[in-house]
Image (tube, rainbow, N blue to C red):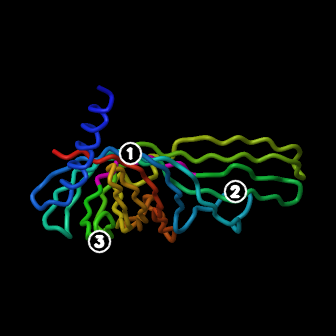
Amino acid sequence: MKKLMMIAAMMVAAVSANAQFEPGTFSIQPKLGGTIAWLSDMPKLPISAGIDKSPVVGAIIGAEAEYQLTDMISLAAGLGYSLQGSGWENYSEGGVELKDAQIELGYFTIPVVANFYLFKGFAIKAGIQPGFLTNAKMKYSIQGKSSAGNLSIDYDESIKDGCEKFDLSVPMGVSYQFKVPVTIDLRYNLGVTKVFKDSGDNKSKNNVVSLTVGYKFAL
């Protein structure tokens, strides 16, 4: 009985894997993973204007539906949630230390990409990705001593009102589907629209590298 169940499972997996590449077929792929994100132009902080920026690590979860147009080309559209933002390096000057400074941004995203399969299982991709802001916070801690006395500031406030609610980026990347069919997807999202409202010379845009693992189901 166990042998029969194993054989049946292997047959289902094989059919599912092959079906993804047949023209005219649909598949859906739940996926999750992580992000490394940064802003192209960071706002100034109260302690110093010359602090180096630092990427932040976030998470991504969602699902994509894919339609196979030909053996080599497919179109995919998805819905996801991405945690991203940017940070600053820890900084110390004159006995005052800035620590754990970062901007946290959350977006619902709708990636739409074209996949070009160079060989079976391996694809390069590009498209567009509208995003809708759900939350935005700035956080930092300032500790130390100054001429005015001891300093101890822990800042953690929403900056959502000062951010654009809509974001547009250009995703590009590669993916590989194993026969299981588990898919590994690596993308770089280049921000097109600015993050902050009325930002003057500051034209911060999102930059996100994401790595996800998904499982494709044939429909």
Residue 103 lies, with reference to residue 72, above or below; the image says above
Closer to us: 188 or 13: 13
- The chief SS type of the magenta part is strand
Range shown magenta: 103-110
- Which x, y percent locates residue 141? 72, 45
Q: Magenta stretch: residue 61 in it?
A: no
**Counting residues from the N terminus, which is met first, the one under dot 2 or under dot 3?**
2
- Point out the residue furthest to the bottom here: 118
Packing grade of label 1 (10 A; few <14, some 14-19, many >=20) is many
Q: On the image, numbered disc 3 is attached to which residue?
A: 119
Quarter residue 23 falls in: bottom left
C-alpha span from label 1 to label 2: 31 Å
Rendered image: mark on residue 81: 1
Q: Is residue 57 left or right of residue 73?
A: right
Rendered image: mark on residue 46: 2
- Which x, y percent locates residue 108? 35, 47
Badge 1 element? strand
- Which x, y percent locates residue 210? 46, 57
